[in-house]
Amino acid sequence: MTPEEMRRLLNGLATAAYVVDAIDSPHLAHCRGWDLTGWSYRLVPWGVRFSYRSHDGRANAEVLSVLMLEGRGARACRGQEGQADRTFLN
């Protein structure tokens, strides 16, 4: 799954929890039709940080799924060149 596909998939913390389970269980990822090769996660306050590293080490990205305490909707923020892309979802 590419970072862009991960961004489109994550629409909230419930979906993030499904992705965490699938990263921990490759069989579950396969059943859901997700190729999560190169993806890892780290639980952060109020959310999950997904990190991607391609097999050749050239592509890196981060996608954050967080609970937004103020306001609603999603906001995306791209890092500067050389930094990982980030997406914030409520």
Image (cartoon, rainbow, N blue to C red):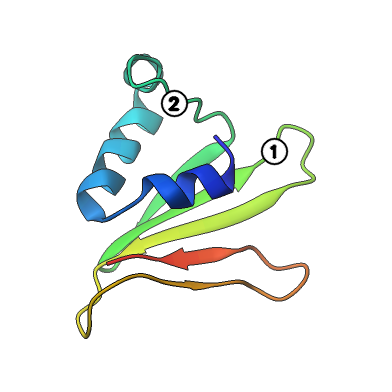
Q: Is residue 79 left or right of residue 43?
A: right
Tag 2 secondary structure: loop
Q: Residue at x 61, y 71 (%)?
A: 78
Q: Which quadrant of the view contains residue 57?
A: top right
Q: In the depicted view, which residue is nearer to us: 76 or 56?
A: 76
Look at label 2 and name its amino acid. Trp
In percent of width and height, residue 28 lies at: 32, 19
Q: In the depicted view, which residue is nearer to us: 66 or 9?
A: 9
Examine the rendered structure and indicate whether residue 57 appears above or below residue 13. above
Label of residue 34 in the image:
2
Dot 1, how many residues are within 10 Å of its Cα: few (below 14), some (14-19), or many (20+)? few
Look at label 1 and name its amino acid. Ser
Examine the rendered structure and indicate whether residue 23 appears above or below residue 78. above
Q: Residue at x 39, y 44 (%)?
A: 9
Q: Which quadrant does the N terminus fall into?
A: top right
Q: Nearer the viewer, mark 1 or mark 2?
A: 2
Which residue is situated farthest in the bottom direction here?
70
Q: Is residue 52 left or right of residue 88?
A: right
Examine the rendered structure and indicate whether residue 79 appears above or below residue 38. below
Q: Residue at x 23, y 77 (%)?
A: 72
In percent of width and height, residue 83 lies at: 69, 68
Tag 1 secondary structure: loop
In percent of width and height, residue 90 lies at: 27, 67
Q: Alpha carbon of mark 1 to alpha carbon of mark 2: how far?
A: 15 Å
In percent of width and height, residue 82 lies at: 77, 67
Mark 1 and mark 2 lie on one chain; the one further toward the N terminus is 2
Residue for badge 1:
54
Dot 2, how many residues are within 10 Å of its Cα: few (below 14), some (14-19), or many (20+)? some
Q: How many marks?
A: 2
